[in-house]
Structure formats: C-alpha cells, structure tokens
Amino acid sequence: MLNIAMDGPVGAGKSTIADAVAAELGILHLDTGAMYRAMGLAALRAGVNTRDEAAVTALCAKTEIGVRQEADGQHTLLDGEDVTGCIRTEEVSLAASDVATYAGVRSAMVAAQQRIAREAPMLLDGRDIGSRVLPEATVKIFLTASAEERARRRYQQLIDKGERADYDQVLADLKKRDDQDTHREVDPLRAADDAVIVDSTELSFEETVARIIAVIREAQHE
C-alpha cells in the first residue's frame, strides 16, 4: 500500500502542497499538524496552561481528536465538533507547538495517525512522519524553504485574509516555532535519513508539486 511521509518546518506549505500531491495521485491526505492544533485549541478553551505538561497530558487523555475526509478535504474534529475553521490562528499555532512537545500527547496522536494510515493509501504530512509515524513509508519527503521565504508567504496569507500582520513578528514567531520543533526532547523535527529534501525557496507552488510528484513516481518504479 502506498504511504507517503511528508515532513518539514512550519510555513513550508506542507498542507496545501500535500493536498495537491494527494489529489494528483488519487489518494487521501492526512494533515497531522491539524490534530495537534486541535489539541492546542482544546487547551486554550479549557484554560489549561499549554506550558504545563501534566495538565495538558491529563486533558489529552479525556479529549477526542479525530478527522473526517469530505469532498473539500480533511475536517478536524475536537470531541465531535468540527473545528477546521478555528485552528489556523497564530494563537492556536503557538499552543500547538507547546502541546506537541509532550510525550503523552505525541504518543496518543501517533497511535491515531498510524491507525488512520492503515486504512487506505495515504499521504501524511507533519513533523515526525518519516522518522516516527511511518518509518516504513514508501516515499519520504522533507519539504523546506528559508525562514524568510516561509515568513513572507505566511505574512501574505494573513494580509490576503484581511488580517493585520507584521512581517517581522511573523518571522520571529516562525523562528520560535522552528526552535521549539527542532529542539523538543520527544520526536524533534528532522529529516529522516532516507528522505528526499525538496527546498521550495525558489520554486512556485506548481513547480514544488511537480518536483514531489516526480520523486514519488521515480520511487514507485525503482
């Protein structure tokens, strides 16, 4: 069964790129980062300090995070509520980065992701897919871009949505996320030893999708 692992830092465009790649291949796409975002949202709603590992882990144990695939893509569920439209704020993003550092949270999410991946051919994107969730994936991609380019893209997304944004603050937040993700003790962000690195700094969206499709096609014919 075809399982594709796509990892990379925040702002690399994994979710939208993965959507396009999965659609081209005719397989499902699981955005694992959305699951951690939902857990971050759960902590914020419950008034739990996201820096309190014991409290967050206890909350996770009684919280149900799920996904549902619909015609317009993945919908993320928090205790049965569709929170897809609530988890893309900067506040939730930072909360997700906090809760994703905890072993208890990661263990629960990884188990759920592995269970989902066994159901059908699928592309999973996240931070530890190739190294932790799907170490035997058919193909492993590490999608990245310079911090400045990732911040520029994120800044433009916020502006396009009519939100106030400051590029320097977006860049600072992004670098903070990078530091948290690469230095956490549990399942830190890193490229798996057998991952193909795709740097999209100088590539358009379409060029990036085409590059990844070419990598996957080549691997399938090896």
Image (tube, rainbow, N blue to C red):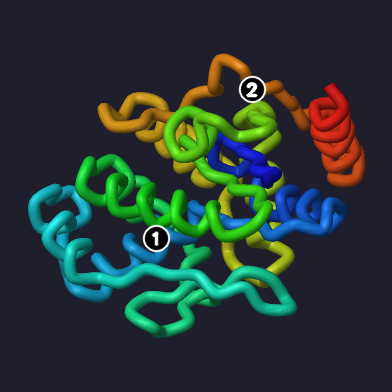
How far from the left and from the top, in percent, is residue 189? 45, 29
Q: Which residue is mark 1?
A: 91
**Quarter of the image containing the C terminus?**
top right
Nearest to the observer: residue 50 or residue 124: 124
Residue lying at 52% horizontally and 64% vertically, measured from the top left: 88
Question: Looking at the figure, which quarter contains the N terminus?
Answer: top right
Q: Which residue has dot 2 on it?
A: 195
Q: Nearer the viewer, residue 168 or 32?
A: 32
Whole-percent x and y of residue 21?
80, 49
Task: Give me the C-alpha separation between circle 2 and circle 1.
Answer: 31 Å
At a point 39% along the width and 66% down the height, the residue shown is 38
The answer to whether residue 144 is left or right of residue 112 is: right
Q: Which residue occupies the extreme bottom position in the image?
A: 81
Mark 2 is on which residue type?
A: Ala
Q: Is residue 79 left or right of residue 166?
A: left
Please tell me which residue lies in front, 84 or 47: 84
Q: Is residue 171 visible?
A: yes
Q: Residues within 10 Å of mark 1 (few under 14, many from 20)?
A: few
